[in-house]
Amino acid sequence: LLLGESGTGKEVVARLIHKLSQRAGRTFTKVNCAALPVELLESELFGYEAGAFTGAQRAKPGRFEICHKGTLLLDEIAEMPIPPQAKLLHVLQDGEFSRLGGTTTAKADVRIIAATNGDIHHAIEARRFRADLFYPLNAFTIRIPPLRESQEDIPVLLGPFIESWSVS
């Protein structure tokens, strides 16, 4: 679980975790949980079968299938609507999911990295986020501080830029 304000580099950290892992040669993808309505979010994560809804003319794999053996970043997880949270919890607990409109289950071996700039504890208290989903996501938490809290990092971060701009 990556926690930090907007602009602190949560996606950069997630990509680095993927790049330095044994899953580096596999797919890394991101889903913004706040940007999609609940119906689209579920089909994006779990895929759908032909005929599952109006306009679903052919089956489409979801991110869990696409990221098999890879990494899925669930950005803005604290903003995820309640309905897909139960399905996500099921995948985390059992490693299985079903496409929308599907009758069979599929296995998912996906590393989940969740990120949020929101107060996930407040979302739990307000019953907008499931506590039972928070616990597996919170197994390992990284708080990414804003640059104003780690000003000693500024020279290190600027070094490569200054070096590349100084080359004549």
Image (tube, helix red, strand yellow):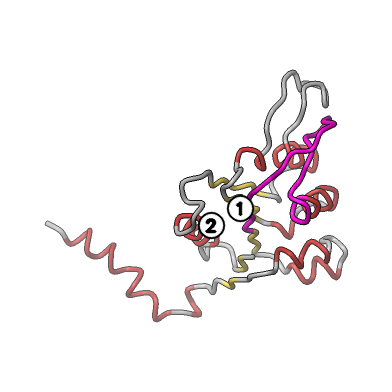
Residue 36 position, x and y percent, is 72, 43
Q: Residues within 10 Å of mark 2 (few under 14, many from 20)?
A: some
139 displayed left or right of 124: left
132 displayed left or right of 23: right
Q: Residue furthest right?
A: 127
Residue 134 position, x and y percent, is 76, 65
Residue 43 position, x and y percent, is 74, 36
> For the residues carrying marks 1 and 2, which lies nearer the camera in this image?
1
Which residue carries the number 1 mark? 73
Q: Quadrant of the C terminus?
A: bottom left
Q: Residues within 10 Å of mark 1 (few under 14, many from 20)?
A: many
- The magenta stretch spans residue 103: yes
Question: Mark 1: which amino acid?
Answer: Leu
The residue stretch that appears in magenta: 91-113
Q: Quadrant of the N terminus?
A: bottom right
- The magenta stretch spans residue 162: no
Q: CA distance from mark 1 to mark 2?
A: 8 Å
- Name the residue: 82% across, 31% down: 102
- Name the residue: 77% across, 26% down: 49
> What element does badge 2 sit on?
helix
Q: Nearer the viewer, residue 31 or 112?
A: 112
Q: Nearer the viewer, residue 89 or 35?
A: 89
- Name the residue: 76% across, 45% down: 96
Asked if the residue under mark 2 is in contact with the one under mark 1, i.e. CB atoms within 8 Å, the reply is yes
- Name the residue: 65% across, 59% down: 114
Residue 11's tag is 2
